[in-house]
């Protein structure tokens, strides 16, 4: 073979390799009917979800959810793709819902136009068109669940009544306490000064100075309406404060209570006693609970059926090899 011919063959082979390489854009993680989930799509979804978890969770809770994400993300993406395929097959159109949602977001954020929204999203690193696409796809999935699951759920009056009779403890309203407080921070005051202030406030209370006046003069917390913190249900206050409040009668003032970030002097303004909701009061909550229970079961059954009727081939069970 002459030198020119060798060069020509090499050039042809390089061209063929280039063309073949262009076709094989990236690795496929899974095939779902006629669609594929690529490695880059998986990585993008994984990284986005990890960022969300980091923003919302920390410590052991974060690591627990991180491990769950690694185990379940591919399965979730397959389910999402199956639902999207169903929406397209059924010809579901959510354009108007998407438009209404965008208008609502603009209104809530005082934005006049789509251009304003695009700029606001760009400032947060969000690509508008991609966001709209994801919004539309999510709404299409929700539309499938609504048509195939939600509309099939029927609640019978007898099961609502039975639930109320069988689980009355779920409809006990806990007591509520409306309190006012004088707060002294332990992070901005040295210990000796905290003790001086506590003693001074206590002495003025004994001498007849109104609690509300002392709130205005000393409290380092909210001072509106004499330090009124509003109503709290049992379990919503710090344990030490709650225990002190439970011992008070309306109008009484507690001893000083040490809490996480400081000291509190608490006055009980009003108390609502615990009571049992009537069936009519509880009915809406029961209906919602039963509906969600049935919905979850039916969604699982529907997804299982979709999977059984679909061609699903997983090529990389652990895409990131983590």
Image (cartoon, rainbow, N blue to C red):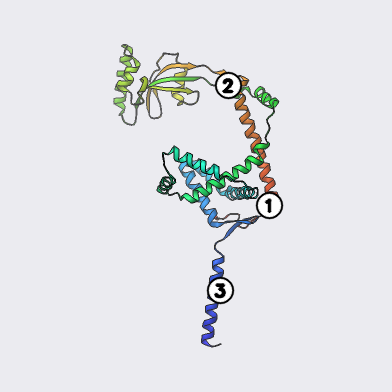
If the image is split into quadrants, where does the N terminus sit? Answer: bottom right
Q: Where residue 148 appears, x then y in whole percent?
A: 66, 41
User: How far apart are the two marked residues, 3 and 1, measured between alpha carbons?
Assistant: 35 Å
Relative to 155, is 132 on the left or the right? Answer: left
The 10 Å Cα crowd at callout 2, few under 14, some 14 to 19, many 20 or more, is some
Q: Which residue is mark 2?
A: 172
Relative to 92, is 199 on the left or the right? Answer: left
Q: Check residue 16 in the rendering and tell me which mark sits there, or answer none.
A: 3
The 10 Å Cα crowd at callout 3, few under 14, some 14 to 19, many 20 or more, is few
Q: Check residue 310 in the rendering and tell me which mark sits there, or answer none.
A: 1
Q: Where residue 272 appears, x then y in whole percent?
A: 50, 17
Q: Which tag, 2 or 3, sits closer to the chain's start?
A: 3
Quarter of the figure with residue 266: top left
The 10 Å Cα crowd at callout 1, few under 14, some 14 to 19, many 20 or more, is few
Q: Residue furthest bottom?
A: 2
Disc 3, SS:
helix
Q: Which tag, 3 or 1, sits closer to the chain's start?
A: 3
Q: Which tag, 2 or 1, sits closer to the chain's start?
A: 2
């Amino acid at each position: 073979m002459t030198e020119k011919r060798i060069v020509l063959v090499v050039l042809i082979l390089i061209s063929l390799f280039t063309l073949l390489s262009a076709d094989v854009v990236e690795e496929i993680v899974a095939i779902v009917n006629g669609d594929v989930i690529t490695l880059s799509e998986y990585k993008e979804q994984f990284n986005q979800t990890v960022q969300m978890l980091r923003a919302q969770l920390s410590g052991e809770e974060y690591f627990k959810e991180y491990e769950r994400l690694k185990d379940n993300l591919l399965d979730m993406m397959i389910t999402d793709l199956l639902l999207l395929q169903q929406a397209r097959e059924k010809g579901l159109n959510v354009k108007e819902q998407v438009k209404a949602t965008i208008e609502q977001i603009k209104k809530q954020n005082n934005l006049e136009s789509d251009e304003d929204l695009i700029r606001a999203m760009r400032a947060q690193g969000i690509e508008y068109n991609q966001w709209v696409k994801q919004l539309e796809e999510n709404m299409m999935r929700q539309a499938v669940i609504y048509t195939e699951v939600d509309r099939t759920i029927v609640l019978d009056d007898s099961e609502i009544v039975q639930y109320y009779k069988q689980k009355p403890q779920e409809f006990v309203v806990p007591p509520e306490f409306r309190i006012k407080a004088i707060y002294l921070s332990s992070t901005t005051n040295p210990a000796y000064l905290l003790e001086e202030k506590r003693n001074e406030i206590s002495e003025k209370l004994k001498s007849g100075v109104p609690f509300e006046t002392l709130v205005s003069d000393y409290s380092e917390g909210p001072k509106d309406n004499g330090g009124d913190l509003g109503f709290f249900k049992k379990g919503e206050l710090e344990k030490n404060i709650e225990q002190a409040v439970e011992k008070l009668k309306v109008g009484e003032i507690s001893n000083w209570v040490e809490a996480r970030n400081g000291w509190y002097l608490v006055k009980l303004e009003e108390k609502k006693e615990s009571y049992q909701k009537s069936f009519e009061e509880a009915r809406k909550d029961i209906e919602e609970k039963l509906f969600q229970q049935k919905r979850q079961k039916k969604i699982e059954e529907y997804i299982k059926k979709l999977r059984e009727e679909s061609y699903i081939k997983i090529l990389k069970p652990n895409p990131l090899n983590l």
